[in-house]
């Protein structure tokens, strides 16, 4: 089983778990949260188990930190919808692992009684193809939004929009790796890892 939950990325001098929005979740919260290695500049990523995060938390977090933030809604480590927001209220969204997103979003025909019999059929593959094309058409605008958001965060990204588009079209077994790569590609400095042993 892969990870299902949320990856929350924001900047704060204090630990993100100290944000008031997490204070209402109860004492068992810390058992359902893990922190990734922080990135330079106070950028932190929290990995929250399913059921902790609510869509309304993002504006609250941006207000508390005074900086842009984003959250990836992850399903079984195979697909994620990333939503970013800056203090000016500008929002962007992008899917990671488009093929899996297309399979998740495709609408089943009304005359299908058993979905399991429809999956794998030629019609199913065709429907996924159409949905994948729709998502693909949104990638340039998604990449533009992501770059504008990173710029609002004060990050000096040297990447061309085409590089971000390529990443949004990329496929990884674990979508968490794509999310991490997207942040790096947008110009957020890499987390300091301990030197590997020879």
Image (spheres, grey):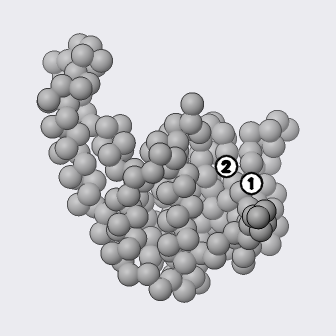
Q: What residue is shown at x 38% (from left), y 81% (from top)?
A: 160
Q: Can you give x and y, in whole percent of width and height, for residue 74 in the image?
A: 52, 44
Q: Quadrant of residue 195?
A: bottom right
Q: Can you give x and y, in whole percent of width and height, for residue 156 in the image?
A: 54, 86
**N-terminal-most mark, 1 or 2:** 1
Pick the front one: 189 or 135:
189
Disc ID at residue 47: 2
Q: What residue is shown at x 32% (from left), y 46% (from top)?
A: 99
Please tell me whether mark 2 sits on a helix, a strand or a loop.
Answer: strand
Residue density around tag 2, few if under 14, some if 14–19, many if 20 or more, within 10 Å = many
Q: What residue is shown at x 52% (from left), y 47% (from top)?
A: 174
Query: Split into 4 quadrants, where in the image is the N terminus?
Result: top right
Q: Residue furthest top?
A: 113
Position of 142 relative to 157 (above/below):
above
Q: Can you give x and y, in whole percent of width and height, for residue 131 in the image?
A: 23, 45
Position of 16 relative to 126 (above/below):
below
Q: Is residue 20 visible?
A: no
Disc ID at residue 153: none
Residue topped by disc 1: 35
Position of 46 with respect to 144 (left or right) is right
């Amino acid at each position: 089983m892969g990870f299902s939950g949320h990856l929350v990325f924001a900047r704060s001098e204090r630990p993100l778990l100290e944000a008031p929005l997490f204070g209402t979740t109860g004492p068992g919260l810390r058992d359902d949260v893990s922190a990734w290695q922080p990135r330079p500049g106070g950028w932190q990523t929290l990995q929250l188990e399913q059921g902790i995060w609510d869509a309304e938390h993002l504006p609250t977090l941006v207000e508390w930190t005074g900086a842009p933030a984003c959250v990836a809604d992850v399903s079984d480590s195979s697909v994620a919808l990333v939503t970013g927001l800056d203090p000016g209220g500008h929002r962007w969204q992008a899917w990671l692992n488009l093929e899996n997103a297309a399979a998740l979003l495709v609408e089943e025909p009304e005359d299908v009684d058993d979905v399991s019999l429809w999956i794998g059929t030629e019609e199913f593959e065709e429907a996924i193809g159409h949905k994948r094309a729709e998502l693909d058409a949104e990638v340039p605008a998604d990449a533009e939004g992501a770059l504008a958001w990173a710029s609002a965060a004060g990050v000096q990204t040297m990447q061309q929009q085409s590089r971000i588009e390529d990443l949004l079209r990329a496929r990884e077994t674990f979508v968490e790796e794509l999310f991490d790569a997207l942040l790096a590609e947008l110009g957020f400095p890499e987390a300091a890892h301990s030197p590997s042993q020879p």
